Amino acid sequence: MSENLLEIKELKQHFPVAGSKNVVKAVDGVSFTIKKGETFGLVGESGCGKTTTGRSILRLVEPTSGKIVYDGNVLFDSETKKKADMLPYRRKMQIVFQDPYASLDPRMTVGDIIGEAIDIHKLCRDKNERYDRIIELLRRVGLNSEHANRYPHEFSGGQRQRVGIARALAVNPEFIVCDEPVSALDVSIQAQVVNMFEELQKELGLTYLFIAHDLSVVNHISDRIGVMYLGHMVELAESEELIFHPRHPYTKSLISAVPVADPRTARQSKRIILEGDVPSPLNPPTGCAFCTRCPYADELCSKKVPEFEEISEGHFCACHHRDLVEKSNKGNMKLVIT
Amino acid sequence: MEGYLVDIQHEKLSFFTPAGEVKALNDVSIRMKEGEVLGIVGESGSGKSVTAYSLMGLTADNGKILGGEVNFNGHRMDLMTEKEIRRIRGKEISIIFQDPMTSLNPVYTIGNQIEEAVMVHGDKTRAQAKERAKELLTLVGINEPDKRLRQYPHELSGGMRQRVMIAIALACEPKLLIADEPTTALDVTIQAQILELMNDLKNKLKMGIILITHDLGVVASMCDNIAVMYAGEIVEYGTTDDIFYNPQHEYTKGLLKSIPKFQEKEYSKLVPIEGQPVDLLNPPGGCPFAPRCDSCMKICLERKPGSTEFETVAQDSQNRFINGKHYSRCWLQEKKKFELNEGKEVVR
């Protein structure tokens, strides 16, 4: 097993609600590790805390409590009250944002957007070196040198996302949080960007935390996947294991809700339709967070929070009734394979 | 034209912007029978929404239909005045939009907005309209309709609001419902709920649906026929099975290859369509897809291809909407036809 690059322990991120004493528990005790060189996918519905998790790892928002260890160095620990100075780590950990329309400064040229990171970390000695570096980065993401003097509005969505990636790569990072990097793009462009992420990973040995709500994209790119629901991690396993042997009812329904681009399969297979909506994180259900929508829920679920346990090697799941889910998996085996 | 609910023939539509003329639709023809579900797939800017909006007379002020006919249920929609269209819109044809967050009026209650839709086109009293609104909410699967009628849009979740939008659209039992990316703004589990509901309603109410989307997964489960649009043209049209299992146009093939295969054990690399979408301000002279096409020939850049018909591969004989038509516009097929005819020019 390769070593862990990142360890997250009991990460909590609570936001105060204006005008009341309540807090929104956006992330409520999430633990996982990311190995060197792997792509860790994080899926879940909007409001489940996946983006907040990504941001608190980089301490773009200060976590409420928990522990973040990067490459053996503690970045944040609420118990020892340790808070590392992030500047040196910003060179190693970067982020690509979701919306390529909103995350680039419209008044800066693309060259300056990419160069800003180089300036902050003083990575280039003179102007010429800086210029060469910017051109190199543009080429690397499939743009060319003439693009350096243009402004973001002159680019299409796919090209802007490439600029966002070049900006993240400018400091030669080891780890990149990709926060829904392809959600705002058209399908044909999505594939271009996904392939680019894969190529860059191979060339530069990058480690990704890939956040998305589209399970088929996450499954395609990730080695391991974590599923989040209402601030909790409910299941975590290697991609193939998770897709073919889900043990949490939420994962199972999430998988079955993905529209399959194959009409014959789509006509035959029966979807598991979840009733209702995600409860408000302001007022989450007691016990298991998923119990209000879960087809297996009983009294135990509404009373006791299920433990996030390792059920087979590398497969974690937080559900009281995971054996029932396993049984129904077997019954539906035919369906899953088609 | 008799017998068709929707019959668009050779429609050309342009928007006149400060930057110049944007040719949004270029010779678009669509026919639909009553009760049929047609999917229109394409990237942003391919003209899928513009086609559907022009059917409702909802083209923006700077847009003009420059040629062709737009027939709906016996009306020439392109020739009607706004006043005449208003009598049809909402009654015979209605629409649900992509974003349920912004398409409801925030200062009126849900009940108010549904009742309005009911009363505009009928002679119902307020009390009758209220009854009907309750019926509609139950129909779209909203519990406690009495309570919901008094609530405002901000009190409902995204999925609920989209259900309300559907209820408003169904108020007068339209013959055609246009669903413009109805689930794009929703989460997958909610998307599954809404698609299930639309499938249900389609069978119950026997209305036609035009489903506009960029998600091939969404059309696969619902549609009878699919039109694939690119740069204001329908590049391929066929039954759902034709499009998925026997795609003929290079763009359709590219689209199918560029989506990640879910639930497949072997990892296969995605095959993207290289290049950028067409700039409709100055579209290429020949086939619009030619600059991004791997099998581009010289003629593709110069002249527009005609359409070629294929045999349908659809096996489902139960489905009365499979009209067996499958055609695409591509020079490769023209070339094949030419070769089959032993070099004689094909007379169209």
Image (tube, coloured by chain):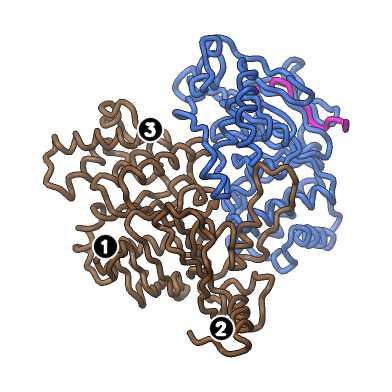
Specify the chain shown as blue: A
Counting from the top left corner in percent of width and height, residue B311 is at 52, 67
Q: Amino acid at mark 1?
A: Asn
- Residue bearing the label numbered 2: B303
Is A93 part of what is drawn in magenta? no
Q: Which residues are magenta?
A: A1-12
Q: Earlier in the sequence, mark 1 or mark 3?
A: 1
| Residue drawn at point x = 35 percent, y = 42 percent | B201
* Separation of residues labelled 2 and 1 (CA atoms): 35 Å
Q: Callout 3: residue from which chain?
A: B
* Disc number lying in front (1 or 3): 1
Q: Earlier in the sequence, mark 3 or mark 2?
A: 3
Specify the chain shown as brown: B
Counting from the top left corner in percent of width and height, residue B120 is at 18, 49
* Separation of residues labelled 3 and 2 (CA atoms): 52 Å
- Residue bearing the label numbered 3: B156
| Residue drawn at point x = 84 percent, y = 49 percent | A204
Q: Callout 1: residue from which chain?
A: B
Assess whether mark 1 and mark 2 are in contact (beta carbons under 8 angstroms).
no
Q: Tell me if I can see residue A116 in this picture.
A: no
In depth, the one of A283 and A163 nearer the eye is A283
